Every structure is written in structure tokens, then in C-alpha cells.
Image (spheres, rainbow, N blue to C red):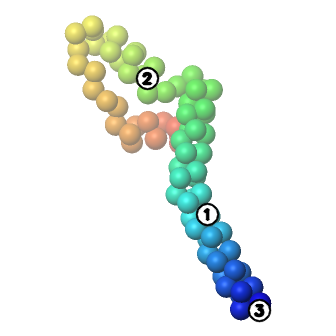
Amino acid sequence: MIILGIILSVAAIGFFCWLLFNLAVFALPFFAGVSTALRAYQKGRGLARRRHRRSLRRGAHARNRPIPVERGVGAWIAD
């Protein structure tokens, strides 16, 4: 019975380590993305709005190029 308790304890610790690892791998990036999106929405910013303004400046027939990530992240951090 003691050996069974030790084996189950080690299995439970392994399970919780696996669960914590999966939480860090999947939930943390999701939380960071949702937080960033909500902050951009609350500030009235975002890539879609910025692209729309730029395409209106260039004209209807201009090619809509993606904005570099560095500019978007830099603007978010500088605020």
C-alpha cells in the first residue's frame, strides 16, 4: 500500500507539471493576444483601421501592403 501511494504521488506530480506546461504553452499566448487586442480596441487603434486610412490616402487602386510588426509594437509600447 505504501508503494502504491508513492507511485500515485509521483504520477500526480507529473500530471500537474504536464498541466502547468500546457497552460504556459497555450493559455499564456492567448491571454497576451487578447489583452493586446482589447487595449488596441479601447485606444481606438488597430491594424485594420490603420490599413484602411492608409489605403484611402493612396487611392482606391493602390496595393494594400501589410504594416511591419515593429511599427505596430513600437507604437503600442510608446503610448
Please name the amino acid that badge 3 sits on.
Answer: Ile
Residue underneath mark 1: 19
Name the residue nearer the viewer: 9 or 45. 9
Q: In the rendering, at what x and y percent does residue 48 appear?
A: 43, 23
The local secondary structure at tag 1 comes to helix
**Measured Cα–Cα span from mark 3 to mark 1:** 26 Å
Identify the mark nearer the N-term, 2 or 1: 1
Please name the amino acid that badge 1 sits on.
Answer: Leu
Q: In the rendering, at what x and y percent does residue 63 appear?
A: 23, 19
Q: Is residue 36 left or right of residue 8?
A: left
Residue underneath mark 3: 2
Identify the mark nearer the N-term, 3 or 1: 3
Q: Is residue 54 visible?
A: yes
Q: Is residue 24 above or below residue 49?
A: below
Please name the amino acid that badge 2 sits on.
Answer: Ala
Q: Are marks 3 and 2 in contact (CB under 8 Å)?
A: no
Total labels: the figure holds: 3
Label 3 vs label 2, nearer the camera: 3
Q: Is residue 79 visible?
A: no
The residue at the point 77 percent across, 92 percent down is 2
* Quarter of the image where one finds residue 10: bottom right
The residue at the point 46 percent across, 41 percent down is 74
Residue underneath mark 2: 48
Q: In the rendering, at what x and y percent does residue 20 appear?
A: 62, 64
The local secondary structure at tag 2 comes to helix
Q: Is residue 10 left or right of residue 21?
A: right
Q: In the rendering, at what x and y percent does residue 18 appear?
A: 58, 68
Q: Is residue 15 above or below residue 39?
A: below
**Measured Cα–Cα span from mark 2 to mark 1:** 36 Å
